[in-house]
Image (cartoon, rainbow, N blue to C red):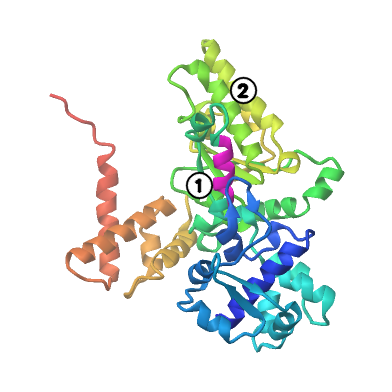
Amino acid sequence: MYDNNLEMTGLLLTAEIYNKIEELQVDDLFADLRKQYWDIKEKTVKRPIVVTINDLQELYDIKDPDKVIKTLPFLEFEEFGSTIRITVLDLAVKWIAKHEQGIDYIKSNPVLAYYYEKNHSLDVSYEESKQDNEPKEVSRQWADSLISQIGNQKDGEDLLKLVHVMVPEEIDQTIDKLVLNQDQKDEVNKMIKAIQFRDYLKRIGLLEIGKLLFVGPPGTGKTSTARAMSAKLELPILEVKLSMITDQYLGETAKNIDRVFDLAKKMNPCILFIDEFDFLAKTRSSDENAALKRAVNALLKAIDEISLIKHRVLLIAATNHPQLLDSAAWRRFDDIVDFPLPDTNMREAILKIVISEIEGSFDPEEIAAITDDYSGSDLRMVVREAVLNALMEERTILTQDDLIRAVGEFDKRTALKYVPIDNR
């Protein structure tokens, strides 16, 4: 935390420098400032940035900005418009540099790091500061700008109904909270490197990278991993279920598929996550009707034509039923990532994460041993049941017996799924 004087002066100096130096881009602005001044229609922060009393109150919860301003001789409050500005730039620059937290503040602010690195002999790095600063694509404002633009286009509102857009700052399920096997970890790291070296891959003509197929039973982490990759790669994620884009009249499905892929290209850089991939890309039979054939062909063609390297779109498809996919669907993907049911060690690791914030005495190893064939989602459901059962007794401290009882209840409920209904 920085004191009010430093935050106020830092904001004003950042605005002053950003307004004057055209070379600086919107990604150079620190996240809170960028969100405060973001223009949805223009998809950027417009120059000049004008700082008002209201901005200081919203950003830093400064109750009496005028009182703080009076303590700093290089600031001036203009009653008309309630704006604040720097009157003597050099004084503000020197004041921040001498502040006890000044160097740390400058290092956290790419605009100031750029200025001080070029004009003053301070040990700061613009490149390092920018690398640590979250990009605009992380924020909801960036996504909303694109959504607003697309929504105003012909059929734009109908197109946006087909997808669910999430941004990294809204995702809680991060990579470090997932239990992945080594193959899954390696695939995530490959995509990180592919994005990092995208220009190199484009230069050498290696374009068929960034199309992943996640396969595995329900609840094994396919969707969670796709979202966690969104957070890790700092890219928005567009989620679509193929069943949702299948029109009541099948003839519209091919058009909807094209619309979704066009939307991903317009919202680049991003992740396009297609769930229920087997819904259309299934083994094609000879009696298939012409509309369904067109839809399947449209999907496969769209996959062929999208590229992480050219369009900055990482494509991830997921299926619970890989046996339904034909060879034409399989060969569209450069990597297949298997999501099997977790083994005993993975189940124990998942349980440790899920119960980490719950007070009580537990033995995750014992629970892992009695939950064979449970998915990660099943294990979370068990813990949920244990917590709710304890709350029924007005307890917030759980025991091992609570978890064991919840496993038994889950097993009974699962068995009921397979009991035939007697309609007599």
How packed mark 2 is, by other alpha carbons closer than 10 Å (few <14, some 14-19, many 20 or more), is some
Q: How many marks?
A: 2
How packed mark 1 is, by other alpha carbons closer than 10 Å (few <14, some 14-19, many 20 or more), is some
Left or right of 166 on screen, residue 371: left
Q: Vertical placement of 234 versus 73: above or below?
A: above
Q: Earlier in the sequence, mark 2 or mark 1?
A: 1
Where is mark 2, residue-wise?
298
Tell me which residue sits at (72%, 72%) in the image. Answer: 112
Residue 204 position, x and y percent, is 87, 44
Left or right of 146 on screen, residue 195: right
Kindly give the residue lying farthest to the front in the view shown: 80
Tell me which residue sits at (70%, 81%) in the image. Answer: 92
Nearer to me, 398 or 156: 156
Residue 281 position, x and y percent, is 56, 27
Task: Give the quadrant of residue 16.
Answer: bottom right
The kind of residue tagged 2 is Ala
Where is mark 1, residue-wise?
223
Tell me which residue sits at (66%, 42%) in the image. Answer: 313
**Residue 147 is inside the magenta segment:** yes
The kind of residue tagged 1 is Thr
Query: Magenta-highlighted stretch: main secondary structure?
Result: helix
Left or right of 286 on screen, residue 334: right
